[in-house]
Amino acid sequence: MPIEAIRKRRSIRRYEDKPVPDEALEQILETIRYAPSWANKQGWQVMVLKTPEARNLVSSVLEGNPAQKAVTEAPVLLVVCMDPNASGIQNGKEYYMADAGILMDHIMLEAADLGLGTVFIGLFDEDKVREALKVPEQWRIVAMTPIGYPAKMPKERPRKELEEILHWEKW
Ligand SMILES: Cc1cc2nc3c(=O)[nH]c(=O)nc-3n(C[C@H](O)[C@H](O)[C@H](O)COP(=O)(O)O)c2cc1C
């Protein structure tokens, strides 16, 4: 599954008005448990928002984000919250952002494998989202993603060639 899911995943910003089956959502949520994290701290909490009221509320504070509409269109919204202290901070590196990224990737790839769309939403006014969802101060709100059936499959976005990225044996 991984390579096919990796290849077919796209950021989906338009969704069909069609429910996500409970089994599919459960399967996606189950992948959260298997995500690696620094020292296995699993310093995350995930909100699952299905009601239009909750999703509309979040959308109302995503003004200007290209994925704003996606949050109201898709029937499920996941919000990933991290406790930086629980996740671990060493040598000035705050591992919670890495942990959250991996968690999101698990979610996005499992969804892609099931024919469902997602989009990593990382740009938002955290205070406004916190206020809307009553998230306690201890938790950073790092990312969210809608989950639903894609209404439009975007073309592949350009990627760097490996030669531009890799350093074999020496820099
Ligand atoms: C950390 C991170 C934050 C992102 N934040 C947003 C966002 O706030 N809104 C949005 O529409 N897309 C967001 N994206 C999606 C990227 O724009 C998208 O992944 C990139 O353009 C490549 O396109 P693809 O996902 O279709 O391959 C984010 C992606 C990442 C990894």
Image: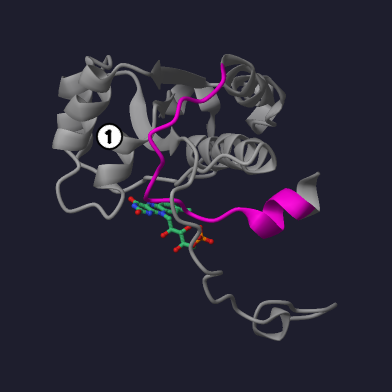
Of 154 and 82, which appears nearest the observer?
A: 154
The overriding secondary structure of the stretch rendered in magenta is loop
Counting every numbered tag in the picture gives: 1
Residue type (three-letter) at the residue carrying disc 1: Thr
Name above or below for residue 132 compared with residue 127.
above
Q: Quadrant of residue 1?
A: top right
Give the residue displayed 54% in from the left and 42% down from the top.
Answer: 101
Of 92 and 152, which appears nearest the observer?
A: 152
Taking 171 as reference, is 135 left or right? left
Range of magenta residues:
4-21
Find out whether residue 162 is within the magenta segment. no
Q: Which residue is mark 1?
A: 72
Q: Quadrant of residue 88?
A: top right
Which residue is the extreme one toward the bottom? 163
Find out whether residue 6 is within the magenta segment. yes
Q: Tell me the element at label 1.
A: helix
Q: Position of residue 39 (x, y in %)?
A: 68, 27
Give the residue displayed 42% in from the left and 18% down from the top.
Answer: 48
